[in-house]
Image: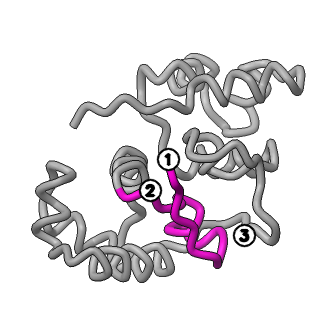
Amino acid sequence: MVIDMIYQKKLEELRIENNITQYTISEYLELNKRVYGQYEREYVIMPLKHLNKICNYFNVSLDYIFGFTNQKQYYNSNKEINSKVVGQRLKEFRKNNNLTQENLAFQLKTTFSVISGYETGRRLIATPFLYTICKKYKISADYLLGKIDDKIIFDK
């Protein structure tokens, strides 16, 4: 699945605003600078664990990084992502939108067993799948990831 994500600009802006080099971020993430550079330019999609760590570093929300809101941060945002909470919220989202696991899998061009793995908390949702769901259904990534408790639906 090829998806055009838009975190590149925000990551670069935050890094430059804070006078931080790609090397500094790559060390913080415990990555090779070349790998981080590929992430920042979106040559390779950044895993959620790294995106979350960057959000925590700059004290911004994932919704801000994804360009869903101009609000940089949410009050009382959790730092960690709990895959069990993600699974519960993803399942709740799916049911509220009258989607079966198969329907959602079809939309994301994956299998229902992948969706099942996300919903049971056995694995953390992939960045492009999270982005696609949030963009299409205008729901907060931070909410689905359990970083905030208030369910936010965007107007965009």
Question: Which of pointers 3 and 2 lies earlier in the amino acid sequence?
Answer: 3
Residue drawn at x 11%, y 56% is 106
* Front residue of this view, candidates 73 and 28: 73
7 is within the stretch colored magenta: no
| Residues tagged 2 and 1 counted as in contact (Cβ below 8 A) | yes
Residue 63 point in image, percent of width and height: 60, 50
Q: What label sits on residue 78 in the rendered view?
A: 3
Q: Label the magenta part by its dominant secondary structure.
A: loop
Residue drawn at x 67%, y 37% is 30
Residue picked out by circle 2: 138
Say what secondary structure mark 1 lies in.
Answer: loop
Packing grade of label 2 (10 A; few <14, some 14-19, many >=20) is: some
* Front residue of this view, candidates 92 and 121: 92
Instruction: State which region is magenta.
Output: 137-156
Packing grade of label 3 (10 A; few <14, some 14-19, many >=20) is: some
Q: In front: mark 2 or mark 1?
A: 1
Residue picked out by circle 1: 156
Residue 2 point in image, percent of width and height: 25, 31
Reply above or below: 117 against 45: below
